[in-house]
């Protein structure tokens, strides 16, 4: 526990708005925390919610989904789909015990570099306050001691390839 | 094979309902062929074998072992490890063994909560002393042991090495027979076995493709639960606002449920290439939900409209992962050690 917890957040951006917002933040020298790893998609509508689960199960502490404001999608209305997916996803994740702060949706136009940087900063602090997600730990520590403890008399429970 | 030269067949249930056995016996008169070709080595549902019979077999004695049911308690795990050792071919038979199925829905809660629902907090329960099953009980005659109830339900392949998988809840009889024919040909006539690890007895496309209901462009304002509306016959159920897992589910069953007005439950599991059936279904549902807006609309109003539509899907995790929880990317809910609160006898800690 010597190192302070630095959350890892995967950020999905769309090619036409939010990625350019992040770019603008960069060229404008607006600082945002390095905890976010941005991935560019052509559209937030490309975001298969499987990506979010993969990120969380694979070690991310949070996922930020970003896209064009509703009504401004380069592909007309795919970001409405994103909003609907996100709404269902958040409800599903709540049933898995994942806090709503860990998966967020933020709209950012190409001109909103400074605002996106603020939102990233806010999310990093919220997830930092929640602590690590460590989903591999949730899977590995399934709450059940090894079989040999229950059936020590059964030599066949041991040494069998799992 | 032993002296009479017949291959040995076993079928065992772990945490299962018995439907897989019924479906197996439903292959009709082919069961006579199965009887002629195989010697039964272990089949608790239909024949009187004991565990000690299996213990007495040499390793690899059973040629084909079909295991249905999820791994729910320590006895399930002990038995499948034993049968793995005694079997040449081990098949995850049916949705429970394949991906957890209904038993694995309890991965959304804790062992403690499951036991409470079953033994304490339920209107139909009369248990004034609050008795809960204990893995170990000391009685004057000695120590009584019952299997330990797990916190996390697992699929068969998460516990032992699995050679083949047959999906379905239960697998359809014609699919079971097709698979048995392949195995029988391999065992008796030297035919080749399918490569290890493959899914047998299923199609390769979505259930929708074998569903005869008429399909159009889909846009639904809200969803209904099956008891809330009477579906119009002959028309795609999703279009009528009934959740049907067809788009995210592997074919092979013949789309039986939608034909009788019940949306596909998803029991054949995800399509090839889909890592997480629940998320694939969530995507499909979100795509057909007809809630959008126009440029300049208030974003909060839009969110409220989407939330209201999402309210019509009760229990999304239980719906989208009804059969595939144990095989999903997340596998179980995070409970932060709540299960440790269950009182454990000293011997287990």
Image (spheres, rainbow, N blue to C red):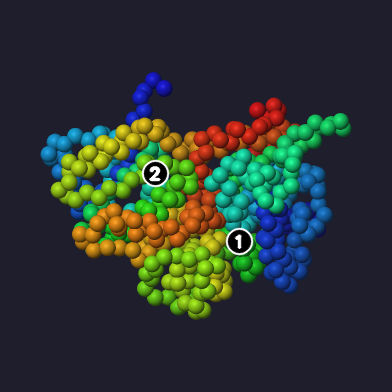
Image position, residue B36 (x, y; %): 77, 66
Q: Quadrant of the N terminus of chain B?
A: bottom right
SS at badge 1: loop
Label 2 element class: helix
Give me the residue at 37% from left, 69% from top.
B219
State the residue at coordinates (48%, 45%): A96
Distance (Cα) linking label 2 and label 1:
33 Å
Frontmost residue, B342 versus A66: B342
Q: Chain of mark 2?
A: A
**Which dot marks residue B231?**
none
Q: Chain of mark 1?
A: B
Q: Residue at x 34, y 59 (%)?
A: B305
**Drawn side of residue B9 relative to residue B302, left or right:** right
Q: Residues within 10 Å of mark 1 (few under 14, many from 20)?
A: many
Q: Which residue is mark 1?
A: B169
Q: Residue furthest top?
A: A2
Left or right of B284 in this view: B244: right
Q: Which residue is mark 2?
A: A100
Residue B273: image quadrant is: bottom left
Q: Are marks 2 and 1 on the same chain?
A: no
**Residue B214 sits above or below residue A81 on the image:** below
Of residues B250 and A106, the one drawn nearer to the viewer in this rendering: A106
The correct choice, above or below, for B185 with respect to A6 in the image is below
Using the rendered view, name the quadrant where residue B349 is placed: top right
x 27%, y 48%: residue: A106
Q: Position of residue B283 (x, y in %)?
A: 39, 58
Q: Residue furthest left?
A: A28
Q: Is residue B272 visible?
A: no
The percent position of residue B203, horizontal first and vertical second, equals 52, 66
- Mark 2 vs mark 1: give the one in front: 2
């Amino acid at each position: 526990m010597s190192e302070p917890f630095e959350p890892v957040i995967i950020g999905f951006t769309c090619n036409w708005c939010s990625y350019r917002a992040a770019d603008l933040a960069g060229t404008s020298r607006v600082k945002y925390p390095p905890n976010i790893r941005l991935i560019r998609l052509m559209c937030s509508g490309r975001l298969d919610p499987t990506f979010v689960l993969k990120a969380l199960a694979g070690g991310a502490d949070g996922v930020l989904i970003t896209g064009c404001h509703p009504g401004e999608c380069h592909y007309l209305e795919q970001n409405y789909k994103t909003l609907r997916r996100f709404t269902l996803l958040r409800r599903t994740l709540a049933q898995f015990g994942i806090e709503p702060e860990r998966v967020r949706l933020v709209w950012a136009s190409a001109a909103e570099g400074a605002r996106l940087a603020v939102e990233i900063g806010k999310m990093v602090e919220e997830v930092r306050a929640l602590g690590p997600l460590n989903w591999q730990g949730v899977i590995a520590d399934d709450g059940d001691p090894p079989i040999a403890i229950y059936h020590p008399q059964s030599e066949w429970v041991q040494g069998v390839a799992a | 094979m032993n002296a009479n030269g017949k291959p040995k067949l076993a079928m065992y249930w772990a945490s299962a309902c018995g439907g897989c056995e019924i479906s197996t016996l439903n292959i009709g008169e082919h069961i006579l062929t199965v009887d002629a070709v195989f010697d039964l080595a272990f089949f608790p549902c239909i024949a009187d074998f004991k565990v000690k019979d299996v213990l007495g077999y040499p390793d690899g004695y059973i040629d084909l072992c079909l295991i249905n049911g999820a791994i729910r308690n320590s006895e399930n795990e002990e038995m499948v490890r034993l049968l793995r050792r005694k079997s040449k071919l081990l098949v995850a038979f049916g949705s429970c063994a394949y991906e957890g199925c209904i038993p694995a829905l309890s991965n959304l809660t804790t062992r403690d909560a499951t036991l409470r629902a079953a033994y304490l907090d339920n209107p139909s329960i009369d248990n004034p002393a609050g008795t809960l099953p204990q893995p170990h009980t000391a009685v004057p005659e000695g120590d009584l042991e019952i299997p330990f109830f797990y916190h996390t339900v697992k699929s068969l392949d998460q516990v032992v090495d699995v050679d083949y998988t047959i999906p379905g809840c239960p697998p359809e009889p014609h699919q079971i027979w097709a698979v048995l024919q392949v195995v029988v040909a391999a065992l008796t006539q030297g035919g080749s076995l399918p490569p290890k690890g493959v899914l047998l007895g299923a199609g390769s496309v979505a259930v929708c493709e074998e569903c005869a209901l008429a399909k159009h462009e889909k846009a639904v304002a809200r969803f209904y639960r099956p008891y809330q509306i009477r579906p119009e016959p002959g028309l795609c159920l999703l279009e009528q606002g009934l959740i049907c897992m067809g788009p995210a589910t592997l074919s092979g069953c013949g789309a039986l449920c939608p034909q009788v007005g019940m949306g596909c439950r998803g029991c054949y599991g995800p399509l090839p290439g889909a890592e997480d059936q629940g998320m694939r279904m969530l995507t499909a549902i979100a795509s057909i939900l007809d809630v959008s807006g126009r440029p300049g609309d208030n974003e909060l109003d839009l969110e409220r409209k989407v939330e209201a539509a999402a309210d019509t899907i009760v229990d999304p995790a239980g719906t989208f992962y009804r059969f595939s929880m144990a095989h999903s990317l997340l596998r179980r809910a995070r409970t932060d050690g709540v299960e440790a609160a269950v009182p454990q006898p000293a011997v287990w800690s």
